[in-house]
Amino acid sequence: MPIFIYTGQNSQTGKKVKGQVESDSAKSAKLKLRKQNIYVVEIKEETTSQGGSGGTSFWQSLNRKPPTPEDIAVATKQLSILVKAAVDISEALKAVSEQLENAELRSIYSRIREKVSEGKSLSEAHGEFPKVFSLIYVNMIAASEKAGALGLVLSRLSEFVSYQIAIRRKVIGALTYPIFMLIAAFAIMIFMFVSILPKITKAFSTLKVTLPWYTVALNGVSAFMQDYWIIMIVGFVGGGIFFSYWSQTPKGKRNLDYFLYKAPVAGPLMQKVSVSRFSKTLATVLSSGVRIMEGLQLTRNVVGNAVLEDSLDEVMKRVQDGEKLASALEKTNRFPTMVIHMLKTGEKTGKMEEMLTNIAEVYDEEVDQQISMTTKLIEPAMMIFMAGFVLIIVMAILMPMMQAMNSLK
C-alpha cells in the first residue's frame, strides 16, 4: 500500500504537523487525516529511489531492521504505563511510536494508531501485523478489551514477552558453550591430521620403522582427509543445509523434538523448559480473561515442542468432554507429578492462575540449576575427550619413535 507524506495543520491546536500515512490514494489519505483533525496543506506519495511509487527508498528498506522481541517488550511496557495513566489510546500509541528506536516498529505503531482512529479495535489493528504480533498477543488484547482491563493485560503481556526472551536466552546459553567446544575440538583434530601427523609419519618411512596398527590407521585417516578434503567440506555443508531444511519441516521438527525429548542431557532440560513455558503462558492468558479451551489452544501454539503439542491436543479433547485440566494432563504422562498435584490444588481452591505461575517459577529455577550443572560437567568431559585424542596421537608418534631409537642402538 502506498505511503503519503503530508504537511498540514491541527484544526484543534493550530499547530503545524508533518508525517506520513498509509492509504490507497491521496484522497483516502486526506480523509484519514481529516478524522484525526488534521487539515492537509500538501500531500505527496513517497517514491522509491528508482522513481517508482509505493514505499520507502531502496536503501531505507535495506537498512531497516525487523522488530526484535526486546523492542516489542519495551513498546508494550510503555503502552501499558500510558494506558494505566488514563492517556487516550490514540495519544498513547503516538507517544510510543515517537519513543521507539526501531524504525520498522515505529512505522507499525503509527499505522496501528491510524487504524484505531479509523474505528478499528486495538486488537484488530495489532492483528494486521501477524509477523510482529503473535496470535496470543492479539487474543490477549482482545480479551482485555472485552473485560475493560487493557492496562493490566498490557503489563502482563510485557512481562510475558520478557519471560519468553529470558527462556530463549537460557536455552541458547546452554547450547552455545558445548557447540563452541565441539567446533574447537573438531578444528584441532583436522589440524593434527592434515598438518602434523603426515610430516611425522613421512619421517618414519625414511627410517624404515614398522608402524603400529593404530599409527597406520591414523595415517590412513590423514591421507583420506588430505585427498578428499573438498568432498568432506561439501558433505558437511550439504549435510548441514539438509538438516536445517529437514528440521524445519513439520515431520522433521516432530521427529527431532521427540528425539531430543528423550536424549540423556538435552531431554530433561527440554522437558523443564517446556513445562515452564506451558505454565507461564496458560497462567498469563487465563488471568487476562481468556476461556480455558481458547487458552489451551493459544498455549499449544507457543510451547514450541511437538511432544507437548501432541499432549495438549489430547488434553483439549478431554477438557472439552468435561474432564478437569489436572486429570487430563495426568493421563498424558508428560507432566511431572508435582505439577499435577499443584494444579489439582489450584482447581480446588480456585487459584489456578496462581498455581501455574508458581509452577513456572519453580521450573525456571530448575532450568537455571540444570544449565549451570550441565555447563560445569561439559568442561571436564570435553577436556577428557581432548586429552584422550591427544594421547592417541602421542602414542601413534611416540611408539614408532621409540622403535627407531632402539633400532639405532
Image (tube, grey):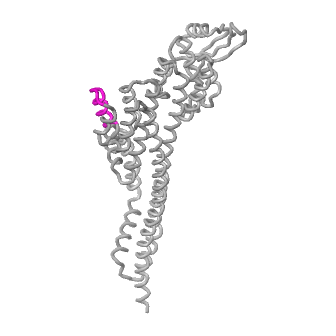
Q: Nearer the viewer, residue 294 or 346?
A: 346
For the point 38% across and 59% down, the residue is 228
User: Can residue 58 be seen by looking at this rendering?
Assistant: no
In this rendering, is residue 93 above or below 251? Answer: above
Q: Is residue 46 left or right of residue 405?
A: right
| In front of the other: 153 or 105 | 153
Look at the image and give the residue range highlighted in magenta. Answer: 309-323
Relative to 391, does residue 227 appear above or below in the rendering? above
- Is 317 magenta? The answer is yes
User: Where residue 117 sits in the image (x, y, percent)?
Assistant: 56, 12
Horizontal side of 307 relative to 88 (left or right) equals left
Q: Residue at x 43, y 40 (%)?
A: 359
96 to the left or right of 119? right
Which of the pair 372/131 is nearer the observer?
372
Going 59% across and 17% down the picture, which residue do you hit?
89
- 75 versus 370 height, above or below: above
Does the magenta run of residues contain 407?
Answer: no
Residue situated in front as seen by the camera: 215 or 315: 315
